[in-house]
């Protein structure tokens, strides 16, 4: 027998990805993520970050991080349940709860760790779990770790969810409904109000992952539950500091009983070192900025409306987004890739989203508008869109 090659299979798999152009080619930021960044040596208008409010470079947020290193050091030294539970972590959780108008919150290493650690603890053998077919990969992984029966309902289809709940009602103990608040590929918003009302009739628990709604939707950027005025009907709101809040770290917000249960049961929380003082303090400052400087969320929406309006008037199809996520639909994957490369040449950084992330004929460039972009940045990007759109015969 030929000797086994423990790594050769990886080379083959990787080469397959490269042959299909499905491998990631990483671009490098040489400096901060900002309205204009230096990427691979070139200054570009940033149109593909999740830094919706540009808080990653906000002076108060940076200052808080520096100050926390001075007072608390570089690392926390432990997991939270042992010696790594600092006053900063507890202060942050109080601030999250206050901001979200919930009783309590728990800070996780990331949103991904929140979903992967908590979902498996909320439903098990004999329970049923209902998940939107387009939910985020971290939800999919969390769902895979449960022994609950899972039902995948059609995207944003409340009637399909109702059918599945009705069918499961008498057969299962606990029922858990999970949805993204905002779907990051199309920028559409889940019908969270209808989902919450429907679930209530079945006594089902509602879990909303609002990674792209926080800092964007709702009163003062309080998220999708606030947008639909159903905070009291959502049992778990999962959020992240890695997007609009500009730092890193995930959290769940809800009742005191949820927090107590989650911190005793989620292995990603119990067994992973806690956040360093700098990121924790920066997150506190980011919430502070949201509460005291409402102009950022307003500017985000002003920029979003302007950018979308101009693209539509040039003749681009921008899908059905209801948020700053602005797809420019191009159909063919090769066109989307070419378009993105040409945008980069013209000083605009926006990436293509192609199969298998979206259907084969639904390739697009996904733009994410941010608050820090100035009119000139948007106009420069729009000129590039017009020029390349004509060049590649996407618009007349
Ligand atoms: C980005 C994202 C996450 C992961 O959040 P991190 O804090 O960056 O790990 C989870 N859910 C959704 C819907 C997301 O878009």
Image (tube, rainbow, N blue to C red):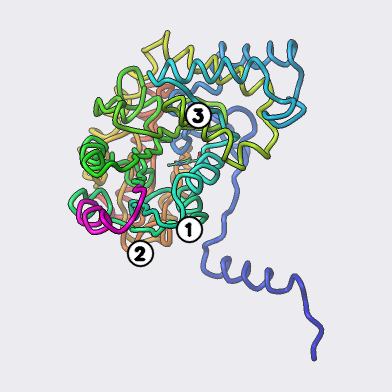
Task: Say left or right for 340 vs 26.
Answer: left
Image quarter of the N terminus: bottom right
Residue 388: in sight, yes or no? Answer: no
Residue tagged 2? 360
N-terminal label among 2 and 3: 3
Task: Say left or right for 295 vs 248.
Answer: left
Q: Tell me if label 1 and label 3 are in contact, CB under 8 Å.
A: no
Taking the spot 32% from the left edge, 30% from the top edge, the residue there is 224
N-terminal label among 1 and 2: 1
Taking the spot 39% from the left edge, 17% from the top edge, the residue there is 296
SS of the residue under disc 2 = loop
Q: Which residues are magenta?
A: 161-175
Q: Where is residue 62, by image quadrant?
A: top right
Residue tagged 1? 147
Residue at far top of view: 292
Taking the spot 33% from the left edge, 44% from the top edge, the residue there is 327
Above or below, 347 relative to 89: below
- Residue 143 lies in the magenta stretch: no
Residue tagged 3? 259
């Amino acid at each position: 027998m030929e000797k086994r090659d423990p790594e050769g299979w990886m080379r083959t798999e990787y080469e397959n990805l490269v042959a299909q152009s499905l491998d990631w080619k990483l671009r490098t930021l040489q400096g901060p993520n900002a309205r204009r960044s230096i990427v691979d040596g070139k200054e570009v208008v940033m149109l593909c970050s999740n830094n919706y409010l540009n808080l990653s470079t906000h002076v108060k947020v940076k200052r808080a991080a520096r100050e926390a290193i001075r007072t608390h050091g570089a690392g926390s030294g432990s997991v939270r349940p042992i010696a790594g539970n600092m006053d900063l972590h507890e202060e942050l959780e109080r601030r999250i709860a206050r901001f979200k108008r919930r009783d309590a919150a728990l800070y996780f290493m990331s949103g991904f760790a929140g979903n992967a650690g908590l979902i498996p603890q909320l439903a098990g053998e004999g329970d049923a779990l209902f998940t939107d077919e387009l939910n985020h990969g971290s939800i999919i992984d969390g769902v895979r770790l449960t022994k609950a029966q899972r039902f995948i309902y059609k995207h944003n289809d409340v009637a399909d969810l109702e059918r599945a709940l009705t069918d499961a009602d008498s057969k299962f103990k606990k029922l858990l409904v999970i949805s993204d608040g905002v779907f990051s590929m199309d920028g559409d918003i889940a019908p969270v109000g209808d989902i919450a009302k429907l679930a209530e009739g079945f006594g089902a628990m509602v879990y909303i992952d609002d990674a792209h709604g926080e800092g964007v939707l709702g009163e003062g950027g309080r998220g999708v539950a606030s947008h639909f005025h159903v905070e009291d009907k959502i049992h778990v709101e999962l959020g992240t500091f890695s997007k609009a809040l500009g730092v890193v770290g995930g959290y769940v917000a809800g009742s005191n009983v949820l927090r107590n249960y989650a911190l005793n049961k989620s292995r990603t929380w119990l067994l992973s070192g806690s956040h360093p003082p700098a990121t924790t303090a920066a997150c506190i400052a980011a919430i502070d900025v949201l509460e005291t400087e409402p102009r950022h969320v307003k500017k985000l929406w002003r920029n979003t409306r302007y950018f979308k309006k101009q693209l539509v008037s040039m003749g681009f199809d921008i899908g059905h987004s209801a948020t700053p996520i602005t797809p420019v639909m191009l159909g063919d994957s090769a066109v989307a890739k070419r378009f993105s490369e040409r945008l980069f040449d013209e000083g605009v950084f926006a990436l293509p989203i192609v199969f298998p992330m979206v259907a084969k004929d639904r390739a697009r460039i996904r733009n994410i508008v941010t608050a820090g972009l100035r009119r000139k940045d948007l106009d420069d990007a729009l000129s590039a869109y017009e020029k390349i759109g004509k060049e590649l015969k996407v618009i007349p």
